[in-house]
Image (cartoon, rainbow, N blue to C red):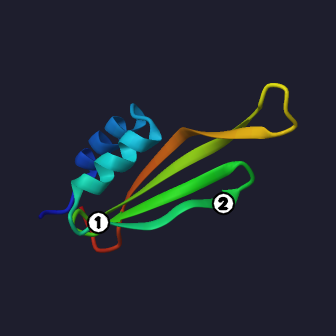
Amino acid sequence: MAFLNRQERQTLLDELVQMNFNKAKGKLRRLDPKGRLAFYRNAQMSGRFHTRYELDGLGTRVTLVEQQIETAIKASKFTKSEFELIEVIVEPTPDNRM
């Protein structure tokens, strides 16, 4: 499988931005058989979580950035956490020179 060039990476970015987290995650898992999950919901900043996929067969690294939204549960002291996809970062791996 050939590495993705700049235009193909931009097309992938445009597709992923339109999706919610679960659909984007599913697309990335199906995209490359050599791809792997580098880390899942890693807390890089307060309230933001990063999930990274290394698509080695395509020479691409994709990071999905989510924001945590806490909502109060009715008539309770507990809160419910929801996550919203706010940013997608698509970048080449060092092996990809395209």
Q: Residue furthest right?
A: 77
Which quarter of the image is occupied by the C terminus?
bottom left
Q: Is residue 73 above or below residue 48?
A: above
Q: Is residue 85 left or right of residue 11?
A: right
Question: Where is residue 29 drawn, in percent x and y?
Answer: 30, 56
Q: Residue furthest top?
A: 74
Q: Residues within 10 Å of mark 2 (few under 14, many from 20)?
A: few
**Residue drawn 67% across the image and 43% down it:** 68
**Residue in front for this viewpoint, 87 or 36:** 36
Q: Is residue 67 above or below residue 98?
A: above
Q: Is residue 95 above or below residue 5?
A: below
**Residue drawn 42% across the image and 36% down it:** 17
Question: Where is residue 37 drawn, in percent x and y?
Answer: 40, 65
Q: Callout 2: helix, strand or loop?
A: strand
Q: Is residue 54 left or right of residue 21?
A: left
Residue identified by numbered label 1: 35
Question: Where is residue 7 drawn, in percent x and y?
Answer: 25, 45
Q: CA separation, marks 2 and 1?
A: 22 Å
- Amino acid type at circle 2 is Ala
Q: Tell me which label, 2 or 1, sits earlier in the chain.
A: 1
Residue identified by numbered label 2: 43
Question: Where is residue 15 drawn, in percent x and y?
Answer: 32, 36
The reply to whether residue 84 is visible in this rendering is yes
**Residue drawn 44% across the image and 36% down it:** 20
The reply to whether residue 5 is visible in this rendering is no
- Amino acid type at circle 1 is Gly
Which quarter of the image is occupied by the N terminus?
bottom left
Q: Residues within 10 Å of mark 1 (few under 14, many from 20)?
A: some
Q: Callout 1: helix, strand or loop?
A: loop
